[in-house]
Amino acid sequence: MNIQVAVLCDAATEDHGKLNLLGSFDTIYTPQLPAVHPQCAVALRVTFSPGDEGPHKLKLNFVNADGHSIMPPIEIPVAVALPDDVHFLTRNFIINIQQLKFAEAGLYSVDVRLDDKSQAAIPLLVKLPPQAVA
């Protein structure tokens, strides 16, 4: 398995196998805490090889700097079967998140795991605007 794209964005779509991203970001500025980010998406583009065939579990976990989850983990069953005429299989995953809550400013991460093995981490920084810092 190879993760080609792992990104946090405003929105994502898929069209005939193409992954379309809108507004990729790694920082959220909020005027107050706690903060709620109304809508975002985690977009993944993953390539599977013949050795990856079979059932798998993709898991996303939003964590704070201490590694504590800030929302329940998202688990997605993934069945990988390569047709005989291909050497690899690419799949796009789009996970829409609404009302993502942040208790405090700081570093967060979206941890991406396949079968409980870490595959990627998408960093996210939550900040108060400079004029809001007291």
Image (cartoon, rainbow, N blue to C red):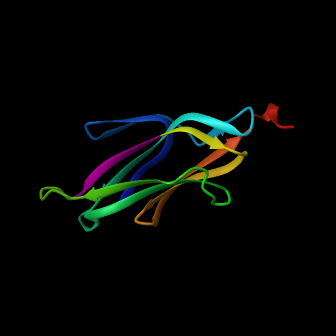
Which quadrant of the view contains residue 16?
A: top left
State which region is magenta. 88-96
Q: Horizontal and vertical percent for residue 54?
A: 26, 64
* Residue 94 belongs to the span the image colors magenta: yes
Residue pictured at 34% horizontal, 56% vertical: 77
User: Residue sitting at 48 percent across and 45 percent down?
Assistant: 7
Residue 61 lies within the magenta run: no
Residue 25: give x, y in percent of width and height.
Answer: 56, 39
| The image quarter in which residue 15 lies | top left
As drawn, is 37 to the left or to the right of 88? right
Which residue is pictured at 27% across the width and 58% down the height?
A: 79
Estimate the x, y position of residue 32 in percent, counting from the top left.
75, 34
Of 106 and 75, which appears nearest the observer?
Answer: 75
Q: Is residue 84 left or right of residue 46?
A: left
- The N terminus - image quarter: bottom left
**Which of 12 and 103 lies nearest the eye of the viewer?**
103
Left or right side of 85 for 20: right
Most prominent secondary structure in the magenta stretch? strand
The answer to whether residue 83 is above or below residue 31 is below
Of 57 and 49, nearer the camera is: 57
